[in-house]
């Protein structure tokens, strides 16, 4: 078992491709197998199994529990967390996946969230921004040069989702009631929550380079954090 310092966050880049590398259905719980079998396409079923197998294997490195015995509970928003009796050290984790990539963040004590999105040029970014982004963010996107607006949209989206997932509020916290920075090439930051501009002092956001054609962000409820990025499975 490895002890994880509260100042450090592990980020695991998981490739959900063919063949199903790292998939271990035997370590999944009965309810996870049921969830996997609900997928219509075999590709999606195997990606779910790969992702859950990776999560259990990685968490077991920091817990005195084998992967198949780890138990999850779920917040009202649906965010999974470890059963309290199995988590005396306050381990935190979050998972996001898009297309053939997944990100798993693991930390200690501090709430954290991660989001990854495959960049798609066929989405109506203007309509989505009008529906989900704050007035401040929409203005920031409009101010970007045309060639940066697609990247700016996905940068804004992943930053907002990572923050929401860290809070655990999900849909209970409307996306338009807080703002993040929108420039895709500048350092991300939580700018305000319902007009409170001091909140950035309590949150650490960082964009992540995962793979070509993707945007990703991690959010940690701490003033700063040391990030360590790995690839799973890691032969070491």
Image: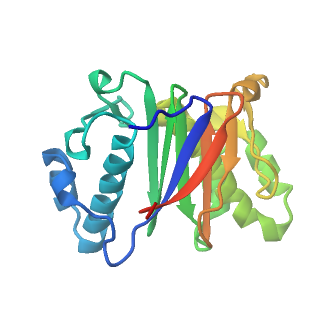
Identify the residue at the far bottom of this view: 18
- Quadrant showing the N terminus: top left
For residue 208, what is the image quadrant? bottom right
Residue 177 in the image: state x and y as whole percent.
64, 32
Residue at 75% across, 45% down: 188
Q: Nearer the viewer, residue 51 or 97?
A: 51
181 displayed left or right of 14: right
Is there any visible trace of residue 171 in the rendered image?
A: no
Residue at 38% across, 43% down: 61
Q: Nearer the viewer, residue 12 or 180?
A: 12
Residue at 45% across, 42% down: 94
Residue 201 in the image: state x and y as whole percent.
76, 25
Is there any visible trace of residue 232 in the rendered image?
A: yes
174 displayed left or right of 54: right
Q: Nearer the viewer, residue 98 or 121?
A: 98
Residue 163 in the image: state x and y as whole percent.
59, 38
Q: Nearer the viewer, residue 22 or 75?
A: 22
84 displayed left or right of 7: left
């Amino acid at each position: 078992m490895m002890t994880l310092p509260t100042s450090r966050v592990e980020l695991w880049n998981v490739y959900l491709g063919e063949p199903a590398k790292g998939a271990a259905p035997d370590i999944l719980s009965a309810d996870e197998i049921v969830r996997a079998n609900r997928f219509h396409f075999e590709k999606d079923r195997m990606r779910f199994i790969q992702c859950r197998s990776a999560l259990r294997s990685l968490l077991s490195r920091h817990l005195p529990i084998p992967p198949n015995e780890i138990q999850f509970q779920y917040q009202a928003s649906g965010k999974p967390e470890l059963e309290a009796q199995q988590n005396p050290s306050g381990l935190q984790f979050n998972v996001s996946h898009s297309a053939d990539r997944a990100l798993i963040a693991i930390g200690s004590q501090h709430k954290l969230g991660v989001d990854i999105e495959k960049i798609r040029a066929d989405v109506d970014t203007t309509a989505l921004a009008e529906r989900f982004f704050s007035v401040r963010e929409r203005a920031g996107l409009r101010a970007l040069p045309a060639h940066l607006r697609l990247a700016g949209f996905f940068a804004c989206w992943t930053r907002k989702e990572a923050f929401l997932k860290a809070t655990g509020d999900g849909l209970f916290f409307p996306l338009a009631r807080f703002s993040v920075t929108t420039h895709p090439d500048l350092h991300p930051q939580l700018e305000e929550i319902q007009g409170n501009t001091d909140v950035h002092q309590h949150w650490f956001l960082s964009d992540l380079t995962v793979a070509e054609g993707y945007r990703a962000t991690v959010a940690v409820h701490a003033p700063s954090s040391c990030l360590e990025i790995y690839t799973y499975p890691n032969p070491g």
